[in-house]
Amino acid sequence: MYREPEALEYRQFRETVRAFAEKECVPHHKQWVADGIVPRELWKKAGSAGLLATAAPEEYGGGGQDDFRFNAIINEELTKARVHGPGFIVHNDLVQPYLLKYCNHEQRERWLPGFCSGETITAIAMSEPGAGSDLQGITTRAVADGQDYVVNGSKIFITNGINADLVIVVVKTDSGAGANGTSLLVLERGMPGFERGRSLNKIGLKAQDTAELFFRDVRVPKTNLLGEENQGFIYLMEALPQERLAIAVVAVAAIEQALADTITYCKDRKAFGRSVGSFQNTRFVLAELATEATIARTYIDRCVELLTQKRLTVPDAAKAKWWTTELQKKVIDACVQLHGGYGLMSEYDAAQDYINTRFQTIYGGTTEIMKEIVGRSLDL
């Protein structure tokens, strides 16, 4: 796929991430799948390698690079290595913007060093059993009581939910104010009443720990409030474009890797005495997929540039998220078809790609919600 040549600093960082994936992740990934979780030690190694907190200030151990392209490189290289276990995307792309923008000085001193080193693993808890993409429908409540909030409720589908030491929890602090009554509280491992449920048995992404979280009269100091009370919904809307673009980056990287592998397979696989790739139908299918992959790459690279410039809009991020993830489903399905029976075998990458792809159009906001966001922007 064509893309503009990268500057030296990005190429060097890409080589670092690729080497990390090959050495620290790929040899162990099958075990992580069996365990349903990545060992905490990997996070410390990632912190030492500079793969965590790329935008955090250097004084806390971060990369000091407020440039989303570094995050995109991490996501691309792990995706192309088919490393789905570490929830680095949650740590870097979802949680990091909240901590950097809304933490006060005391909170930065308390949380950022561990966040940067990998000793403190993070998650963000939005979805509930009765509220997924509709964040206004959450029911987890935080009631002020002296110097604390008392939190009751539950969350579901929380990536890094088992490993996480810090969890940004979306709560209602004013149940009568609708979206304007939402706040963000940081809950910490060990707080009485903060419990983790089962590690959820997903159809794919098996190495990535995903959990239910329960809050039963959890006393959370008011010093753990992120930003201002009742401003949480605004904060979420400001941060969601980066989350959705991160998912789109993964989608395009997965498309490119699956397509490259399938082209190689079609060159080598023989049918009726000739390579599968020599048949006109195969060439036409791959030509269509390659064209759409190039279009996706061009748009995503532009979106990454806009986000780095702080100019990516909510509708444009929604367009990127829904279109690339739906394209990922289309491309991976076609790649399985071109593999024939081998595409159905679990030991083949094509089969694993097929299973893991299905998540992409759901988390971070479903395709339907993304289209609704785009539709509203059209002033119909």
Image (cartoon, rainbow, N blue to C red):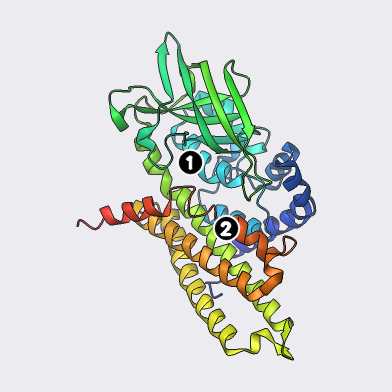
* Res 72 label: none
Residue 36 shown left or right of residue 153 in the figure: right
Helix, strand or loop at disc 2?
Answer: helix
- Horizontal relation, residue 215 to residue 119: left or right: left
| Three-letter code, disc 1 | Pro
Query: Can you tell which mark lies on residue 97?
Result: 1
Please report the residue visible at 67 percent of the width from the left and 59 percent of the height from the top. Answer: 352
Q: Which residue in the structure is indicated by mark 2?
A: 357
Location of residue 3 in the rendering, given as x and y in whole percent from the top left corner: 53, 72
Residue at left 54%, top 49%?
65
Farthest residue in the bottom direction?
273
Location of residue 354 in the rendering, given as x and y in whole percent from the top left corner: 61, 61
The mark lying in front, picked from 2 and 1, is 2
Determine whether the residue tagged by mark 1 lies in a helix, strand or loop.
helix
Q: Farthest residue to the top: give it.
A: 146
Question: Dot 1: within a 10 Å radius of its alpha carbon, few (fewer than 14), some, or many (20 or more) residues?
Answer: many
